[in-house]
Amino acid sequence: MKNNNYGEDKLSFKIENGTLINSSSKNTVTENPIDDIKNIDLSYWNKKLKDSTPDEIIDWALKLSEKRIVTTSFGKYSAVLLSTFNRKDSNINVVWCDTGYNLPETYEHASMLISRFKLNLNVYVPKESRAFTEFRLGLPDIKDPKHKEFSEIVKLEPFRRALKKHQPDLWFTNIRVRKTEYRNSKDILSYSKEGILKVSPFYYWTDGELDALLCKNGLPKNHTYFDPIKALENRECGIHLQ
Ligand SMILES: Nc1ncnc2c1ncn2[C@@H]1O[C@H](COP(=O)(O)OS(=O)(=O)O)[C@@H](OP(=O)(O)O)[C@H]1O
């Protein structure tokens, strides 16, 4: 049974057979003998953190470095991580790569979360205007060879620019198991190609569990989220590959 302690307002809960039950976590991770964030034993710590709650994982990780960011797409479940950081480190740099291709509902969702959580938001946009990109490339679908250049211009280059600017040691994100084969090979902790420690506190949570969490905490869900760079649910947009 997984302990789904979220910890908001000092309340905690777990889900057993689809039912939400109050509980208190007894799984606080106190041991923290890490002196080199670039070389932590991922297999040891992933095992250790697997039964920890997102709050416990975040508390553990926050002790590792002040140089940290949380990324958001303002997508379907973005409210989960952003609301957690509102309690844990409300001033953390939030990085959003606004491709210019979000639906109006996503911009509405973003505006609402930005003001509700007073996000310390850092927005990265493409260097080229949407009009010029579309003039040159159209709006290529994923089968079109031009999709690679399109992704690079509207999302991947802005994301690399964000990492270069912030130079984080720690990157909080919301990748989850099962979404893609690639992600099944990841875990709560993983390293990016540049050696940034990525922390995904909700890695083992299912959609149903996140839905229950949103509902319990009165948080909004961005039902219609669509990212033309990612395009398919089981595809990588590329930011987690670099
Ligand atoms: N545009 C943009 N800007 C900044 N950060 C982003 C962006 N797209 C994805 N992400 C980060 O990746 C997390 C998982 O998102 P996805 O599952 O949609 O994956 S993907 O990266 O688009 O393939 C996602 O977590 P959530 O936004 O909480 O779902 C972000 O941490």
Image: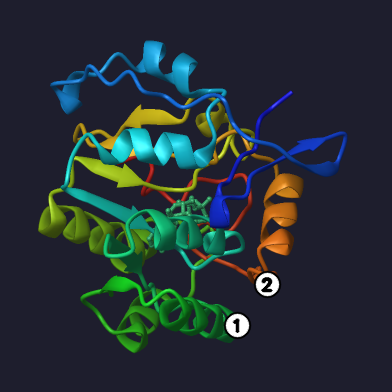
Read off the residue under disc 1: 105
Look at the numbered disc 1 and say if its residue's Cβ is closer than 8 Å to ligand 1: no
Q: Quadrant of residue 23?
A: top right
Describe the element under mark 1 as helix, strand or loop.
helix
* Mark linked to residue 224: 2
Q: Quadrant of residue 165?
A: bottom left
Which residue is pictured at 35% across the width and 83% down the height? Answer: 130
Callout 1, which amino acid? Glu
Callout 2, which amino acid? Thr
| Placement of the C terminus among the 4 image quadrants | top left
Question: What is the image's colouring?
Answer: rainbow
Residue 201 appears in view? no
Look at the numbered disc 2 and say if its residue's Cβ is closer than 8 Å to ligand 1: no
Label 2 packing within 10 angstroms: few (<14), some (14-19), many (20+): few
Q: Is residue 88 shown left or right of residue 38?
A: right
Q: Find residue 196 and report its horizontal and vertical position in percent.
A: 23, 37
Which residue is pictured at 30% across the width and 45% down the height? Answer: 171
Label 1 packing within 10 angstroms: few (<14), some (14-19), many (20+): some
Which residue is pictured at 25% across the width and 33% down the height? Answer: 193
- Is the Cβ of the residue at disc 1 closer than 8 Å to that at disc 2? yes
Q: Is residue 209 shown left or right of residue 42?
A: right
Describe the element under mark 2 as helix, strand or loop.
loop
Q: Find residue 99 and report its horizontal and vertical position in percent.
A: 38, 72
**Comes first in the chain, label 1 or label 2:** 1
Q: Is residue 177 shown left or right of residue 163?
A: right
Q: CA distance from mark 1 to mark 2?
A: 7 Å
Q: Nearer the viewer, residue 41 or 2?
A: 2
